[in-house]
Image (cartoon, coloured by chain):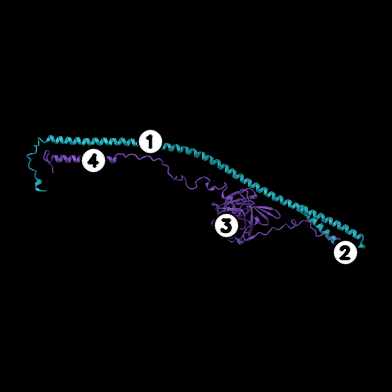
Chain colours: A cyan, B purple
Amino acid sequence: MSASSAWPPPPDPAAPAAGDGGAPVRRRGRRTAVVVLSVLLVAALGIGAYLWLTTTRWQEHSAAWEDEAREYAARVAALDAELAATDAELVAAREQLATATARITDLANEKAQLGDENVASQQYLDYQRRVSEAAGVVTTALGDCVDAQSQLITYLEDRGSYDEKDLDRFASDVEKLCRQASKASDQLQQELEQ
Amino acid sequence: MSRPAGAPGAPAAAARAGGRAGAVLLAAALAGCGVLPALPPSVPDDVVPTAVAPTGPAGSLDGAEALSPDGFDAVQRMAVRIRNVGCSGLSTGSGFAVDEHTLITNRHVVADSETLEVSTYDGRDLEVSAAGSASLADLALVRTTDPLPSYPTLADEDPRPGDAVTVVGYPQGGKLTVTAGEVIGPTTDPLHENLGEVLLTDAPVEPGSSGSAALDEQGRVIGVVYAKTSDDRSLLVPRSTLEQLLEDTGEFRALPPCEPAADGSQEPGSPSDAPSVPPAG
């Protein structure tokens, strides 16, 4: 610190005395207080206005959100109702689908059973046809046997008119024919007994 | 260092005090601005997200896994009913598709056939183009001209005792039926129809179930039903045997035509030609 600042400055003859200078200082202090208070008042008014504006805006904001929330709540309620109706339709559709698939399975089974019966009937008809044809063949063979034996008897009654060897061959053929006819008849009988 | 009031430095001090007060006020104002509430943002027109996230785990829709083009699940769609029209009778069995035109059944289901008729779960008839049977296992392969509705995949390995098994087929030639049980374990083939071990399960089967697919819990083939035991258990040709045969379809030989019954197909009573009449002497 310098020596000049260590001592108070010499009194200024132009400066007012201490007892005279109190009023301006007070006025200045009062002026300062007025200014400060004015500033504070302005600031308070500004803050109040801002708070009023903020409050108003937030109220509007809250109201807008509430409106939006109510709108969405209404949509949710409508969607809930639609969902419930759709769920009910889905349940009904699933029941119908289950019924339809069960019916399809039943119909497929019925068709298969009818197909089996048709094939079995066809096989039985084929068998009957073969048996009938066989019966006809056996009948014809037995008839041929009878006819051949009758013919043989006729030949034998007039042996002189025929060659002996031919008669023997014919008799052998007749015997063979009748044996085959008899065997076929036996087979047919066995088949019919099954 | 203090300075007495009314000293010549008082106005400067007052000015400084005023400035200090102003600074304090300014600071208070700034601090006050910091604690004052901000103005609200504008309310958005739409708050609904563009992509709605699913509310539950994937596939949680009841029955979604069972959805199919017509309401039947894959287990039912792959099963076929086989009608064996033989020379001496009629029999039925089951089978299942392994690809779009190939199905698997048992050798004894298609043996001695004059014609084979295949129908699906919904009653459609499929035309058969070829059929062959394996010699080392009771398995047969049938090719169809028409496409099969659905076919499963083979499991990665043979099942272990205790594994769940589902059998889908046409027991007694009747309705398409799904039965369930558990794998009991491997055993030797009591019928000596298969080379190697077969599988024993407690899934109920009936005559007509032969050729049914045995499936695991994922719907994959673990075996082919070929017989039932006297204590109502079922025997399966294991997946491994089926896989071996499918890898070499040359193992499947074309089915021989059915032999007519010895006395049934030959017309009963067909004697040789009638004897000729001897020439007149």
Chain of residue at mark 2:
A
Per the rendering, the mark at residue B26 is 4
Per the rendering, the mark at residue A63 is 1
Give whichever of A80, A32 is nearer the camera: A32
Q: Amino acid at mark 3?
A: Arg
Label 3: which secondary element: helix
Q: CA distance from mark 4 to mark 1?
A: 35 Å
Residue A154 percent coordinates (x, y): 90, 58
Q: Are marks 2 and 3 in contact (CB under 8 Å)?
A: no
Report the residue at 38% width, 35% height from top: A63
Q: Are marks 4 and 3 on the same chain?
A: yes
Residue A32 percent coordinates (x, y): 18, 36
- Answer left or right for B281 relative to B4: right
Give whichever of B95, A50 is nearer the camera: A50
Q: CA distance from mark 1 to mark 3?
A: 70 Å
Q: Amino acid at mark 4?
A: Leu
Q: Are marks 4 and 3 in contact (CB under 8 Å)?
A: no
Residue A187, visible in the rendered structure: yes
Q: CA distance from mark 2 to mark 3?
A: 73 Å
Report the residue at 56% width, 50% height from top: B74
Residue beneath label 2, please? A166
- Answer left or right for B174 relative to B53: right
Residue beneath label 3, please? B239
Badge 3: few (under 14), some or many (20 or more) residues near its Cα, within 10 Å? many
Tell me the mark number nearer the camera, choosing from 1 and 3: 1
Q: Amino acid at mark 1?
A: Ala
Q: Amino acid at mark 2?
A: Asp
Q: CA distance from mark 4 to mark 3?
A: 89 Å
